[in-house]
Image: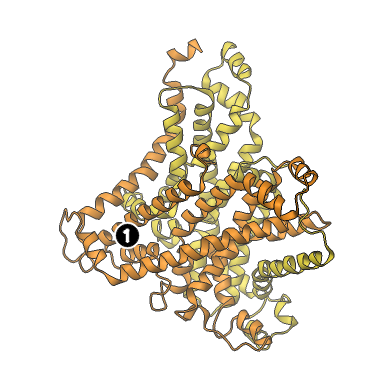
Chain colours: A orange, B yellow
Amino acid sequence: MHFFKKQWIVPYLFLAPALLGTIAFKLYPIFIGLWESFIYTSYGGGVEKRLFVWFENYQYLFSDPLFWQSLKITSLLTVIINPLQISLSLGLALLLMRKTKFIRIIRSLYLLPIGIALPIATIVWGLMLDPIDGLFNSIIGVFGIPPQPFLISEHQALWCIIGIATWKGVAFWMLFLLAGLEDIPKQYYEAASIDGAKTFDKFRFVTLPLLRRTILFVFVADTAANFVLMVPMIILTKGGPLQSTNVLVYEAYRSGFFYQDWGRSLSIVTILTTITLIVIGLQLLFLGDSREGQKLK
Amino acid sequence: MINYFKKNWSIYLWYFVILLGLIITILPFWWGIAASFKTNPKIFGELKPLSLSTFIPGNSFDAYFAIFENNFGRAMLNTFFVSTCSVVGGLVINSMAGFAFAQFRFRGDNIIFAFVLLSFAVPADAIAIPLFKMMRQIGWFDTFYALIIPMLPNGLIIFLFRQFFLGIPKELTEASRVDGLSWFGVYLRICMPLSIPVTLGAGLLLFVGQWESFLWPLIAAPSPELHLIQVTLGRFATEYEAIWNQQFAASSIAGLLPLIFIYLFQRQFVSALTGIEQK
């Protein structure tokens, strides 16, 4: 290794473009968000422009019922959508481990939504869930169920968005779980069989422990992704009806781009980033193995 | 492999659940593509009452001609341009960083590597708003620069290249050094030609990432001349709310291309994404 020392700068040169890019376009914006949430006033859409308001934006936000409503919707969405997507993708991955004739084709078909961008899925599902002409109302009509309002109902809109995001998400996260399941050596199951383990025992004592890291990774990544889920809100509901789909990230988007209220927008982004990091930290703390804590994947 | 489904009845249950799931998965594709070949009155007429013809493609190409008069071709060209630049630029800078992490021990290497991985864990959409403000400060707002350059550094792809380069025997690179090749020569002539599979998978991730991006191009480049394909789709959905067949036609075209690429290179795509080598 002696001749590396003279050229200590070489690795930094190889690293420079990607590292400087990461600092400029990932790290620096987080600081802009934090900094500008302290310096722009937020009252009434930035009519009053004052520098250095410190925590006024946050105080204003915490006294705003719209913010709390938005936080409530975000929490509701997070608590429902993540366990739903993880359990569905794990269940499907287990089902698709069965070796039959057409399993390759069946798997490929199940993975189709991965190749479909969320805006496309949103548009097609939006038309399927159309309250007047939608395919869904025609289908449930066959079973004698009266037409439902779906996306224009404050009680159903959030569930429709959960459905759309889950249709797209399950295929994606299942890909990781399938790869993880395929990676478990066959011998472990054979050994368990010799010891007289039943199907459920094998799942409980072989599959789950060996899949633990994959599940943890999927759970954390899925949670982070769903905290910023807002494409269906932008295209279909605009946060409505009656704020019922107005999650924090959409409220931040709307405050900034519709009302030019950047103080408020960036304060919400900062709060959301903080919540995301705390939740992910808690997941890693409680679900992660201490030995695995240092490895990301 | 574990056999969860031994008894007969459980096999029927398996088929039932799998079939139900397949219907839910495929229905939007099937109906959307079928309806894109119909005129609007035909789409609406066949929805009530529901019949077999609801799911059979029509024979009208009106919607496909109409979308290309609606600036859809421009959006496709833009997206091709932006995706190609991102693939080339992203592969170059991230593979170089991966090479640095795999080949050298240097001051701060572990900390920098952890930082790169962590930066990838922050979702791009979470920093989109402050990044937008930054683009305005440096004058890149509403330019191709804003669409391409911030998306180039990618922790996952650095990680993929590092893992691959770690597998190349040190004897090979050191022998090339002794033969008088510069470090850049080792990277370009020795390591890169060996890494075609990982390059393919990483390039596909970068391409699909740009092809499917929506929020960032929506806020960073609002001019119609700079619209990318998903933004144009979103615009169709809100501006031509009642013109269903055009929405379906545009969605079909926009959705088809990444699907073809992903299925052609399924193995490389899956190993790049999951980090697990496919058998």
Residues A217 and B174: in front is A217
The structure residue drawn at horizontal position 58% and vertical position 67%, both measured from the top left corner, is: B250
The structure residue drawn at horizontal position 71% and vertical position 66%, both measured from the top left corner, is: B22
B246, above or below A267, in the image: below
Graded by Cα atoms within 10 Å as few (under 14), some (14 to 19) or many (20 or more), the crowding at tag 1 reads many
B14, above or below B104, in the image: below
Output the chain of dot 1.
A
Q: Position of residue A42 (x, y in %)?
A: 22, 63
- Please name the residue that numbered disc 1 is placed on: A268
> Can residue B269 be seen here?
no
What residue type is disc 1 on? Ile
> Can residue A183 be seen here?
yes
B186, above or below A202, in the image: above
A20, above or below B207, in the image: above
The structure residue drawn at horizontal position 71% and vertical position 55%, both measured from the top left corner, is: A200
Residues B214 and A270: in front is A270
Q: Position of residue A106 (x, y in %)?
A: 75, 59
Q: Position of residue B193 (x, y in %)?
A: 64, 29
Q: Position of residue B127 (x, y in %)?
A: 38, 52
Residue A103 is left or right of residue A145, and the answer is right
The structure residue drawn at horizontal position 57% and vertical position 49%, both measured from the top left corner, is: B207
Q: Secondary structure at mark 1?
A: helix
The image quarter containing residue B52 is: bottom right
